[in-house]
């Protein structure tokens, strides 16, 4: 989602809310008019004051917005179809209406004016669509006259289909695209140059004219750089995709991850609430751990800040309870830093049992007595709840790795850096550090491609049980 689209999406939420409140107020006012009173012959009991009525509205309005969000009504593009959007508004509003009518039927003392319910339903649909039409006209005007919101597209392939797509985009700027490049075969170096000079939001490729190995490289490049990957298909299939019609031709858009736009926002809200609860719940345990660490090895810090690579390759500092003896901690604040680094390299060469760029030292001799217990049950990671609250990490996601480990990644491994790293994840509930890195990568990619809040909840529930399983490194 482009920045301009995200801004309009946020504005749309407030416009919808305003229209819903206005519709409810108009419905309430109409119910009191004498002509309406005569028409409906004072149906039902009606004793609610304006204040009482608005209290009900303030509860229902957010519910409508949530249903709109699940219906995809806040994925705002200037080129969206008005009548298709109107149908989605009608469907989502009707769902809420049905829920309201069921609730009021079961509890008639809450409210009994069927006129207001039906009138509000019709007014909400009308006013919401009016507000959306106005916002869409503004967004489309900015697209056509200012170029704001254009999706920069690179077209790859040979044949008439590809040429027709290119000519259509150039001829019809209202489609919302701007061609930044047109190449007949995949050349990653050339694509990088185009992206550097002009930027790329989407790639459209005619896959029947491109070899499979090059397609895979292009797909990985798009995943890593958050570029939408679209196909003019032959006979191949994609696991996660949506199909659109462009100039009479079917185009398949492969979805990187549901963690985009409102999915990302929903996950962040979930992380803030979840980390707050976990900080409160684990605070007594953390207090005991602080006392034990300080009692056994009082020289070093209680919490160790470990530099890791986070989302988009940015450096983050992951908090952990220190479970090493201070003299062996690999931080420049340690007076014994050079010896600690040298000793760690020796241990990696002689005692690491993991395959791939990530190391794991078996029976690490640098641990304190309390540190062995903390690491075994992952209590050392409790301070990372504060990382989650800050936004550096998520409760669930790929584990963050050190820069020297990331430097050993193959190019396709960098897909792990496209989302916020997590405290736990698919790998942690499927074998923890006993897995080879390649197996861990595959599990994390599955998570990226199939994310949902329900999946996050399942992983969080399974995590405590996985901690009880023994591991090779203990």
Image (tube, rainbow, N blue to C red):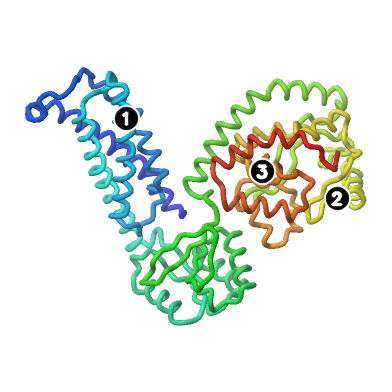
In the image, taking residue 429 as reference, residue 58 lies left or right, namely left
Q: Which residue is mark 2?
A: 353
Residue 425's disc number:
3
Q: Residue at x 54, y 63 (%)?
A: 238
Mark 1 and mark 2: span between their CA atoms? 60 Å
In the image, taking residue 128 as reference, residue 324 lies left or right, namely right
- Between 118 and 59, the residue placed more toward the observer is 118
Q: Residue at x 62, y 38 (%)?
A: 395
Q: Residue at x 57, y 77 (%)?
A: 210
Q: Which residue is mark 1?
A: 102
- Position in image of residue 127 (x %, y %): 24, 42
- Position in image of residue 84 (x %, y %): 31, 54
**Circles 3 and 1: CB distance less than 8 Å?**
no
**Nearer the camera: disc 1 or disc 2:** 1
Mark closest to the chain's N terminus, 1 or 2 = 1
**Circles 3 and 2: CB distance less than 8 Å?**
no
Secondary structure under the numbered disc 1 in the rendered image? helix
Mark 3 and mark 2: span between their CA atoms? 21 Å
């Amino acid at each position: 989602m482009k920045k301009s689209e995200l801004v309009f999406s946020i504005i749309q939420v407030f416009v919808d809310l305003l229209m819903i409140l206005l519709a409810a107020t108009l419905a309430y006012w109409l119910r009191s008019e004498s002509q309406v009173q005569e028409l409906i012959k004072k149906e039902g009991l009606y004793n609610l004051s304006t204040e009482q009525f608005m209290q009900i509205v303030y509860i229902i309005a957010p519910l409508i917005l949530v249903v709109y969000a699940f219906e995809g009504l806040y994925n705002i593009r200037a080129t969206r179809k008005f009548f298709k959007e109107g149908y989605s508004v009608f469907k989502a509003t009707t769902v809420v209406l049905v829920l309201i009518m069921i609730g009021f039927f079961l509890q008639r003392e809450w409210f009994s004016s069927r006129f207001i319910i039906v009138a509000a339903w019709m007014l909400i649909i009308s006013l919401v669509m009016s507000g959306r039409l106005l916002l869409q006209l503004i967004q489309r005007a900015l697209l056509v006259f200012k170029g704001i919101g254009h999706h920069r597209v690179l077209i790859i392939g040979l044949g008439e289909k590809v040429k027709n797509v290119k000519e259509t985009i150039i001829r019809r700027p209202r489609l919302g695209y701007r061609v930044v490049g047109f190449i007949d075969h995949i050349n990653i170096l050339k694509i990088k140059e185009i992206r550097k000079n002009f930027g790329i939001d989407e790639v459209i490729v005619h896959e029947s004219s491109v070899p499979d190995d090059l397609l895979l490289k292009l797909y990985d490049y798009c995943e890593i750089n958050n570029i939408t990957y679209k196909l003019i298909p032959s006979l191949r299939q994609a696991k996660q995709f949506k199909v659109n019609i462009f100039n009479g031709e079917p185009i398949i858009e492969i979805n990187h991850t549901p963690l985009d736009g409102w999915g990302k926002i929903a996950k962040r809200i979930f992380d803030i609430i979840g980390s707050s609860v976990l900080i409160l719940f684990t605070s007594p345990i953390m207090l005991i751990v602080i006392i034990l660490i300080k009692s056994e090895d009082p020289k070093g810090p209680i919490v160790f800040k470990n530099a890791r690579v986070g989302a988009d390759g940015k450096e983050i500092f992951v908090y952990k309870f220190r479970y090493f003896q201070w003299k062996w901690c690999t931080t420049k604040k340690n007076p014994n830093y050079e010896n600690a680094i040298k000793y760690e390299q020796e241990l990696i060469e002689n005692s690491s049992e993991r395959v791939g760029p990530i190391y794991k030292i078996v029976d690490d001799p640098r641990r304190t007595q309390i540190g062995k217990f903390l690491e075994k049950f992952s209590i050392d990671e409790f301070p990372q709840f504060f990382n989650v609250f800050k936004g550096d990490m998520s409760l669930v996601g790929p584990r963050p790795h050190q820069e020297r480990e990331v430097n050993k990644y193959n190019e396709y491994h960098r897909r792990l850096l496209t989302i916020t790293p997590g405290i736990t994840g698919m790998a942690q509930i499927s074998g923890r550090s006993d897995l080879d890195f390649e197996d861990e990568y595959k599990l994390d990619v599955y998570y990226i491609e199939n994310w949902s809040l329900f999946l996050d909840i399942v992983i969080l529930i399974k995590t405590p049980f996985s901690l009880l399983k023994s591991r090779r490194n203990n």
